[in-house]
Image (spheres, rainbow, N blue to C red):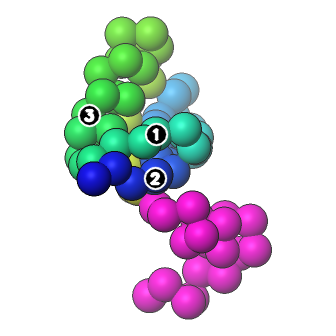
Amino acid sequence: MFDWFIVTLWFELNDKLYMKHYPDHLVSNCENAIVELIDVYKKKYPLREFRAAKCNKPSVWYNKYKLNKWDIYK
């Protein structure tokens, strides 16, 4: 069975931390999606150092990142 995740990656570039969202991953396993994304982007952007990654269901992602309701998901 496949689920839809929004993958959020945090990476460091020039001593600054950045966050980027990847909303179009239909996968059966969150870990596989993260590994795949990191492999692709390490080749494409070799200067980025990946620090963290997270998969969220779309409804959770929307509440956290768009509505800023982080305390709901502690």
Range of magenta residues: 56-74
Q: Is residue 12 left or right of residue 51?
A: right
Q: Please, what is the three-letter code of the amino acid marked with disc 3?
A: Val
Residues at circles 2 and 1 in contact by the CB criterion of under 8 Å: yes
Counting from the top left corner in percent of width and height, residue 64 is at: 62, 71
- Outermost residue on the front side: it is 1
The secondary structure making up most of the magenta span is helix
Whether 71 is among the magenta residues is: yes
Compute the Cα span from label 2 to label 3: 14 Å
Residue that numbered label 2 is attached to: 5
Looking at the rendered structure, the number of numbered marks drawn on it comes to: 3
50 or 27: nearer the eye? 27
Residue at figure coordinates x 44%, y 87% from the top left: 74
Q: What amino acid type is highlighted by mark number 2?
A: Phe
Residue 72 in which image quadrant: bottom right
User: Is 47 placed above or below 34 here?
Assistant: above
Does 62 appear above or below 18? below
- For image coordinates 39% across by 54% down, the residue present is 3
> Could one spot residue 72 in this view of the protein?
yes
Residue 51 picture location, percent across and down: 36, 43
> Residue at the spot x=57%, y=88% of the render?
71
Q: Nearer the viewer, residue 73 or 50?
A: 73
- Cβ atoms under marks 2 and 3 closer than 8 Å: no
- Residue 21: give x, y in percent of width and height: 58, 44
Asked which secondary structure carries label 2, the reply is strand
Residue under label 1, please give it: 25
